[in-house]
Amino acid sequence: MIVHFLYALTALFLGTGCWFSIRYYKTLDALTDQKAYGWLLAGFATQLIALVSQGLETGSAPLDRVDGILMTLAFSVAATLVVSRFKSVVPILISLFLPLVFFLGFVGFLMNLKSEPFMDPHLMTWGMSSHIFLTFLGFSNFTVSFGVGMVFWIQEGQLKQHQIKSWGFRLPSLEILEGLTVFHLGLGFVFWSAGLVLGTEQAYQVWNGFPLWDPKILGSILVLVIYALFFLLRWVLGMRGKKTMTLVMVGYFLALFTFLGVRLFLTTQHNF
Protein backbone atom coordinates (compact mmCIF):
# COMPACT_ATOMS: atom_id res chain seq x y z
CA MET A 1 0.00 0.00 0.00
CA ILE A 2 2.91 2.36 0.65
CA VAL A 3 4.13 1.88 -2.92
CA HIS A 4 0.65 2.54 -4.30
CA PHE A 5 0.41 5.73 -2.20
CA LEU A 6 3.78 6.86 -3.58
CA TYR A 7 2.59 6.11 -7.12
CA ALA A 8 -0.54 8.19 -6.43
CA LEU A 9 1.56 11.04 -5.03
CA THR A 10 3.81 10.89 -8.09
CA ALA A 11 0.80 11.09 -10.41
CA LEU A 12 -0.56 14.06 -8.42
CA PHE A 13 2.73 15.99 -8.57
CA LEU A 14 3.25 15.24 -12.25
CA GLY A 15 -0.37 16.07 -13.05
CA THR A 16 -0.03 19.47 -11.38
CA GLY A 17 3.19 20.10 -13.29
CA CYS A 18 1.46 19.00 -16.49
CA TRP A 19 -1.27 21.60 -15.93
CA PHE A 20 1.35 24.35 -15.56
CA SER A 21 3.25 23.09 -18.60
CA ILE A 22 0.12 23.26 -20.76
CA ARG A 23 -0.71 26.68 -19.32
CA TYR A 24 2.75 27.84 -20.40
CA TYR A 25 1.69 27.46 -24.05
CA LYS A 26 -0.96 30.13 -23.46
CA THR A 27 1.02 32.52 -21.25
CA LEU A 28 4.65 31.96 -22.33
CA ASP A 29 5.37 33.16 -18.79
CA ALA A 30 8.74 32.19 -17.28
CA LEU A 31 7.20 31.85 -13.80
CA THR A 32 4.67 29.32 -15.11
CA ASP A 33 7.51 27.30 -16.60
CA GLN A 34 9.40 27.41 -13.28
CA LYS A 35 6.31 26.10 -11.46
CA ALA A 36 5.99 23.26 -13.98
CA TYR A 37 9.65 22.40 -13.45
CA GLY A 38 9.25 22.52 -9.66
CA TRP A 39 6.39 20.03 -9.79
CA LEU A 40 8.42 17.87 -12.16
CA LEU A 41 11.21 17.75 -9.55
CA ALA A 42 8.70 16.79 -6.85
CA GLY A 43 7.32 14.01 -9.05
CA PHE A 44 10.82 12.89 -9.96
CA ALA A 45 11.73 12.56 -6.25
CA THR A 46 8.61 10.55 -5.40
CA GLN A 47 9.16 8.37 -8.48
CA LEU A 48 12.61 7.49 -7.20
CA ILE A 49 11.32 6.69 -3.70
CA ALA A 50 8.44 4.62 -5.15
CA LEU A 51 10.72 2.56 -7.39
CA VAL A 52 13.25 1.93 -4.61
CA SER A 53 10.42 0.97 -2.21
CA GLN A 54 8.91 -1.40 -4.75
CA GLY A 55 12.30 -2.96 -5.38
CA LEU A 56 12.87 -3.50 -1.66
CA GLU A 57 9.37 -4.92 -1.29
CA THR A 58 9.74 -7.47 -4.11
CA GLY A 59 13.47 -8.13 -3.72
CA SER A 60 14.29 -7.16 -7.31
CA ALA A 61 13.96 -4.25 -9.68
CA PRO A 62 10.25 -3.84 -10.58
CA LEU A 63 10.85 -4.31 -14.30
CA ASP A 64 9.01 -7.61 -14.60
CA ARG A 65 5.67 -5.79 -14.12
CA VAL A 66 3.89 -3.36 -16.42
CA ASP A 67 3.45 -0.72 -13.71
CA GLY A 68 7.16 -0.84 -12.85
CA ILE A 69 8.16 -0.53 -16.51
CA LEU A 70 5.86 2.46 -17.06
CA MET A 71 7.05 4.23 -13.92
CA THR A 72 10.71 3.52 -14.74
CA LEU A 73 10.24 4.86 -18.25
CA ALA A 74 8.54 7.98 -16.82
CA PHE A 75 11.43 8.32 -14.38
CA SER A 76 13.94 8.05 -17.24
CA VAL A 77 12.27 10.83 -19.24
CA ALA A 78 11.99 12.98 -16.11
CA ALA A 79 15.68 12.43 -15.33
CA THR A 80 16.56 13.44 -18.89
CA LEU A 81 14.55 16.66 -18.53
CA VAL A 82 16.26 17.47 -15.23
CA VAL A 83 19.71 16.96 -16.76
CA SER A 84 18.67 19.04 -19.76
CA ARG A 85 17.61 21.86 -17.45
CA PHE A 86 21.09 22.00 -15.95
CA LYS A 87 22.57 22.07 -19.44
CA SER A 88 20.40 24.92 -20.71
CA VAL A 89 17.07 26.44 -19.61
CA VAL A 90 14.72 25.83 -22.53
CA PRO A 91 11.12 26.23 -21.23
CA ILE A 92 9.56 24.60 -24.30
CA LEU A 93 11.13 21.26 -23.30
CA ILE A 94 9.09 20.98 -20.10
CA SER A 95 5.91 21.86 -22.00
CA LEU A 96 6.69 19.28 -24.69
CA PHE A 97 7.56 16.32 -22.49
CA LEU A 98 6.00 16.75 -19.03
CA PRO A 99 2.57 15.61 -20.35
CA LEU A 100 4.28 12.41 -21.55
CA VAL A 101 5.90 11.87 -18.14
CA PHE A 102 2.53 12.43 -16.45
CA PHE A 103 0.75 10.02 -18.80
CA LEU A 104 3.28 7.24 -18.16
CA GLY A 105 3.25 7.87 -14.40
CA PHE A 106 -0.56 8.01 -14.21
CA VAL A 107 -1.06 4.77 -16.16
CA GLY A 108 1.65 3.18 -13.99
CA PHE A 109 -0.34 4.25 -10.91
CA LEU A 110 -3.56 2.74 -12.34
CA MET A 111 -1.77 -0.52 -13.19
CA ASN A 112 -0.08 -0.82 -9.79
CA LEU A 113 -2.91 -2.72 -8.09
CA LYS A 114 -3.67 -4.96 -11.11
CA SER A 115 -0.30 -5.62 -12.71
CA GLU A 116 1.20 -9.09 -12.40
CA PRO A 117 4.75 -10.21 -13.31
CA PHE A 118 4.90 -11.14 -17.00
CA MET A 119 8.29 -12.86 -16.79
CA ASP A 120 10.13 -15.06 -14.32
CA PRO A 121 11.26 -12.75 -11.47
CA HIS A 122 14.40 -14.88 -11.15
CA LEU A 123 15.47 -13.66 -14.61
CA MET A 124 15.35 -10.07 -13.37
CA THR A 125 18.97 -10.05 -12.22
CA TRP A 126 20.83 -6.82 -11.62
CA GLY A 127 22.52 -7.31 -14.98
CA MET A 128 19.16 -7.63 -16.73
CA SER A 129 17.72 -4.70 -14.76
CA SER A 130 20.70 -2.53 -15.66
CA HIS A 131 20.35 -3.50 -19.33
CA ILE A 132 16.69 -2.44 -19.36
CA PHE A 133 17.24 0.77 -17.37
CA LEU A 134 20.16 1.91 -19.52
CA THR A 135 18.11 1.23 -22.64
CA PHE A 136 15.29 3.32 -21.16
CA LEU A 137 17.71 6.17 -20.46
CA GLY A 138 19.07 5.93 -24.00
CA PHE A 139 15.59 6.01 -25.49
CA SER A 140 14.57 8.93 -23.25
CA ASN A 141 17.53 10.98 -24.43
CA PHE A 142 16.77 10.08 -28.06
CA THR A 143 13.19 11.24 -27.45
CA VAL A 144 14.27 14.60 -26.06
CA SER A 145 16.84 15.09 -28.84
CA PHE A 146 14.09 14.35 -31.37
CA GLY A 147 11.79 16.92 -29.74
CA VAL A 148 14.48 19.60 -29.68
CA GLY A 149 15.40 18.72 -33.25
CA MET A 150 11.80 19.26 -34.33
CA VAL A 151 11.77 22.68 -32.65
CA PHE A 152 15.06 23.45 -34.45
CA TRP A 153 13.48 22.38 -37.75
CA ILE A 154 10.47 24.66 -37.22
CA GLN A 155 12.55 27.63 -36.04
CA GLU A 156 15.00 27.36 -38.93
CA GLY A 157 12.13 27.20 -41.40
CA GLN A 158 10.58 30.35 -39.94
CA LEU A 159 13.88 32.21 -40.09
CA LYS A 160 14.54 31.24 -43.71
CA GLN A 161 11.06 32.27 -44.79
CA HIS A 162 11.16 35.45 -42.66
CA GLN A 163 7.80 34.48 -41.21
CA ILE A 164 8.48 34.15 -37.50
CA LYS A 165 5.33 33.65 -35.46
CA SER A 166 4.87 35.65 -32.25
CA TRP A 167 5.69 32.60 -30.11
CA GLY A 168 8.79 31.98 -32.24
CA PHE A 169 10.51 34.94 -30.61
CA ARG A 170 10.34 33.05 -27.29
CA LEU A 171 12.20 30.04 -28.67
CA PRO A 172 15.93 29.62 -28.00
CA SER A 173 18.46 30.37 -30.72
CA LEU A 174 19.26 27.75 -33.33
CA GLU A 175 22.70 27.37 -31.76
CA ILE A 176 21.21 26.45 -28.37
CA LEU A 177 18.68 24.07 -29.93
CA GLU A 178 21.32 22.34 -32.04
CA GLY A 179 23.65 22.08 -29.06
CA LEU A 180 20.93 20.45 -26.93
CA THR A 181 20.08 18.04 -29.73
CA VAL A 182 23.71 16.92 -29.98
CA PHE A 183 24.06 16.76 -26.18
CA HIS A 184 21.09 14.44 -25.67
CA LEU A 185 21.94 12.43 -28.75
CA GLY A 186 25.41 11.86 -27.32
CA LEU A 187 24.01 10.79 -23.92
CA GLY A 188 21.48 8.54 -25.62
CA PHE A 189 24.21 6.97 -27.74
CA VAL A 190 26.27 6.15 -24.63
CA PHE A 191 23.34 4.74 -22.61
CA TRP A 192 21.92 2.79 -25.56
CA SER A 193 25.37 1.31 -26.31
CA ALA A 194 25.91 0.35 -22.67
CA GLY A 195 22.46 -1.25 -22.57
CA LEU A 196 23.25 -3.21 -25.74
CA VAL A 197 26.54 -4.47 -24.30
CA LEU A 198 24.85 -5.59 -21.08
CA GLY A 199 22.04 -7.13 -23.11
CA THR A 200 24.59 -9.11 -25.09
CA GLU A 201 26.04 -10.51 -21.89
CA GLN A 202 22.57 -11.41 -20.60
CA ALA A 203 21.68 -13.06 -23.91
CA TYR A 204 24.63 -15.42 -23.60
CA GLN A 205 23.56 -16.32 -20.07
CA VAL A 206 19.83 -16.76 -20.73
CA TRP A 207 19.74 -17.94 -24.35
CA ASN A 208 23.22 -19.53 -24.49
CA GLY A 209 24.05 -17.44 -27.51
CA PHE A 210 23.62 -14.08 -29.19
CA PRO A 211 20.70 -14.03 -31.69
CA LEU A 212 22.03 -11.24 -33.91
CA TRP A 213 19.06 -11.46 -36.26
CA ASP A 214 16.51 -10.89 -33.50
CA PRO A 215 14.66 -7.71 -34.68
CA LYS A 216 15.23 -5.87 -31.40
CA ILE A 217 18.96 -6.54 -31.41
CA LEU A 218 19.37 -5.78 -35.09
CA GLY A 219 17.28 -2.61 -34.75
CA SER A 220 19.32 -1.48 -31.73
CA ILE A 221 22.55 -1.85 -33.70
CA LEU A 222 21.14 0.01 -36.72
CA VAL A 223 20.08 2.89 -34.46
CA LEU A 224 23.68 3.26 -33.30
CA VAL A 225 24.90 3.12 -36.91
CA ILE A 226 22.56 5.95 -37.94
CA TYR A 227 23.53 8.15 -35.01
CA ALA A 228 27.22 7.38 -35.53
CA LEU A 229 26.74 8.62 -39.10
CA PHE A 230 25.20 11.81 -37.66
CA PHE A 231 28.29 12.48 -35.56
CA LEU A 232 30.57 11.60 -38.48
CA LEU A 233 28.84 14.08 -40.80
CA ARG A 234 28.80 16.76 -38.13
CA TRP A 235 32.30 16.52 -36.70
CA VAL A 236 34.31 15.21 -39.66
CA LEU A 237 32.55 16.77 -42.64
CA GLY A 238 31.19 19.82 -40.81
CA MET A 239 27.58 19.39 -41.92
CA ARG A 240 24.94 21.31 -39.97
CA GLY A 241 21.26 22.19 -40.02
CA LYS A 242 18.42 20.21 -41.58
CA LYS A 243 20.71 17.80 -43.40
CA THR A 244 21.97 16.27 -40.18
CA MET A 245 18.65 16.77 -38.37
CA THR A 246 17.11 14.39 -40.91
CA LEU A 247 19.30 11.63 -39.48
CA VAL A 248 18.08 12.53 -35.98
CA MET A 249 14.50 11.98 -37.16
CA VAL A 250 15.25 8.74 -39.02
CA GLY A 251 17.26 7.33 -36.10
CA TYR A 252 14.52 8.17 -33.62
CA PHE A 253 11.73 6.55 -35.61
CA LEU A 254 13.85 3.42 -35.92
CA ALA A 255 14.55 3.51 -32.16
CA LEU A 256 10.83 3.97 -31.52
CA PHE A 257 9.98 1.00 -33.73
CA THR A 258 12.70 -1.10 -32.08
CA PHE A 259 11.49 -0.07 -28.64
CA LEU A 260 7.73 -0.53 -29.19
CA GLY A 261 6.88 -1.70 -32.71
CA VAL A 262 8.86 -4.93 -32.84
CA ARG A 263 6.67 -6.57 -30.19
CA LEU A 264 3.55 -5.58 -32.13
CA PHE A 265 4.53 -6.42 -35.69
CA LEU A 266 7.49 -8.83 -35.60
CA THR A 267 8.67 -11.91 -33.72
CA THR A 268 11.30 -11.49 -31.03
CA GLN A 269 12.66 -13.46 -28.09
CA HIS A 270 12.43 -10.39 -25.85
CA ASN A 271 9.71 -10.20 -23.23
CA PHE A 272 9.19 -6.45 -23.58
Image (spheres, rainbow, N blue to C red):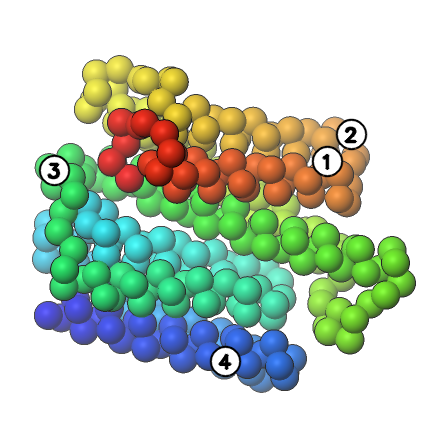
| Amino acid found under the numbered disc labelled 1 | Arg
* Badge number at residue 120: 3
State the residue position of label 1: 234
Q: Does the residue at mark 3 contact the one at mark 2 (Cβ under 8 Å)?
A: no
Q: CA distance from mark 1 to mark 4?
A: 36 Å
- Total labels: the figure holds 4
| Amino acid found under the numbered disc labelled 4 | Phe
Label 3 vs 1, first from the N-terminus: 3
Determine the secondary structure under disc 4. Answer: helix
Disc 4: CA contacts within 10 A as few (<14), some (14-19) or many (>=20): many
Q: Does the residue at mark 2 contact the one at mark 1 (Cβ under 8 Å)?
A: yes
As drawn, the residue found furthest toward the top would be 209
Please name the residue shown 23% across and 52% down the image: 66
Label 3 vs 4, first from the N-terminus: 4
Please name the residue shown 32% across and 77% down the image: 12
Q: CA distance from mark 4 to mark 2?
A: 42 Å
The answer to whether 182 appears left or right of 39 in the picture is: right
Q: Does the residue at mark 3 contact the one at mark 4 (Cβ under 8 Å)?
A: no
Determine the secondary structure under disc 3. Answer: loop
Where residue 142 sits: x, y (%)? 52, 46
